[in-house]
Image (spheres, rainbow, N blue to C red):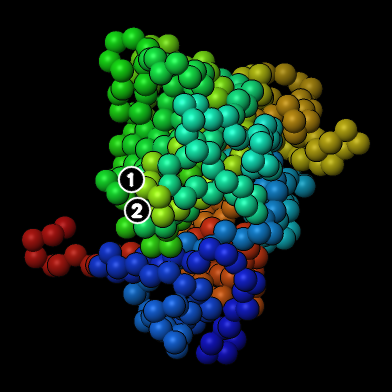
Amino acid sequence: MGLLLAVALTHVSWADELALTGDARLSGEVRSIREDGVVHVASELSPEPLMLKSGAVKKITFAAHKETAVPPGGLVELVNGDVLPASIEDLDATRLKIATPDIGSLEIARDSLKSIQLGVHDQKLLYSGPNSLEEWTKQPNGVRSWRFRKNTLLADGPAVAMREIDVPERFVLRFNLKWKNNPSFTVYFADPLVEDGGKVDRYFMQFSPSGMEVKRESSRGQVQQSVILLNRGPEEFPTNQVNVELRVDRKSSKIHLFLDGEQEASGIDPVDEPPTGSGIAFVSSVPSGTTMEVGDIQVLDFDDARERHHAEDRGDPKTDSMISHDEDRWGGQLTSIRQHQDGTLLTFVSDFQDQPLELLERDVSTVFFAQPEKAAEGEGEAAWIVRLQGGGALRVASCAIADESILASHPMLGPLKIRRAGVVSLERIPTQEPAEKEGKP
């Protein structure tokens, strides 16, 4: 590779965001990362490209790419904690073969595997839009509604837009929020959408110059109580935009808040009975002349089986363990994964029966692999975390950008060429300073 690995990125409407040392921030288009770590950025702040020295950039959050791949149904976890979204193709006594949307086909040594999660991204899409103004124009009390432009709800001043969406007990609400000047925005969810102005049971999230807060509104007792309080004001988002994801689990009374694909906080509903409404409302409270935009709205069902099963006791670490979607568990050995006419088939030899179990992928939730006393973690110290769409994260020793790919070196997977559009962010791992000889262990 030459000294400069150039990147020819396709045009995106949202800029990349760079977090620098000392809490400074910069927005622009990352053109390249050199082999020596220098980051080349095109920015409106300078007529000439900026060259940021090695170590100056803590994190790069890439602009949302239009050509995003559908995440595969599986997550492969390595013994060092790295995770790859993947489709499982084949497994034998020595290696696992997978297909990924952003890296292609990979073979992973079996002793590098910690677990496989199946059916992770098989979430049902309940709504995607906005598709028209009419579906969001229920206007209580004569408040002026949002306007519709290029599949986006646009407000120039105070505005309300709302609609009913049939959601289950667990659901996910995602949307992109963009603003000019200071935002004053509220999104209501699990809302009965009553118009009489009385007390109601619902959740809502507020975003203003003072930060973000998710609250519970109740029809009895204390009217409003905080669920999540986040000290992240608009100055934390230099491009005046953020992707918001709210994962709502009314069965366990938990809410999880994600911003730009990363979990920020979780909270528990303080009221005994969760709200039962299925309405969503976007409210702009900014004065006239200040714009707010909401786009890429998605509502999905929310299956937390991955979190629940992964947090459970896996059993004897010296043997493989398999968990079905019906919560059945077996200890023993996963002997093979192969393609079958009915789908991907897993063969598992259980400790409790002579005949091997054969289960289709759709019936299996989690497989934990036996862990030797000293697991193989590869060689080399990681310098960057590459975060992928679909929940993936890889710690790599080196990282550079060439054309529309990110080139990285992984201690267990070797050299990787990752599709640029599938990378959410690059995060530099802080270098640990050596302890002083005196006064420190």
- Residue located 61% across and 47% down the image: 148
**326 sits left or right of 43 in the view:** right
Left or right of residue 222: residue 309? right
Q: Nearer the viewer, residue 89 or 3?
A: 3
Type of amino acid under label 2: Asn
Q: Is residue 168 above or below residue 18?
A: above
Q: Which residue corresponds to the image point at 72% horizontal and 18% vertical from the top-left? A: 353
Q: Eyeballing the image, is 262 above or below 384?
A: above
Q: Earlier in the sequence, mark 2 or mark 1?
A: 2
Helix, strand or loop under label 2: loop
Label 1 element class: strand
Q: Extreme left residue here? A: 439
Q: Quadrant of residue 304?
A: top right
Question: Where is residue 408, by image quadrant?
Answer: bottom right
| Marker count (numbered) | 2
Q: Which residue is mark 2?
A: 182
- Name the amino acid, label 1: Ser
**Residue 286: where, in percent of width, then height?**
38, 46
The answer to whether residue 367 is seen in the rendering is no
- In the picture, the disc for residue 355 is none
- Residue designated by label 1: 208
Residue at the image position 47 percent from the left and 40 percent from the top: 159
Identify the image quadrant of the C terminus.
Answer: bottom left
Residues under numbered marks 2 and 1 in contact, where contact means CB atoms less than 8 Å apart? yes
Residue at x-position 57% and y-position 55%? 388
Please rate how many residues cluster around mark 2, counting C-alpha atoms within 10 Å: few if below 14, some from 14 to 19, many from 20.
Answer: some
Image coords of residue 48 (percent x, y): 45, 88
Across and down, in percent, residue 123 comes to: 66, 34
- Circle 1: is it few (<14), some (14-19), or many (20+) Cα within 10 Å? some
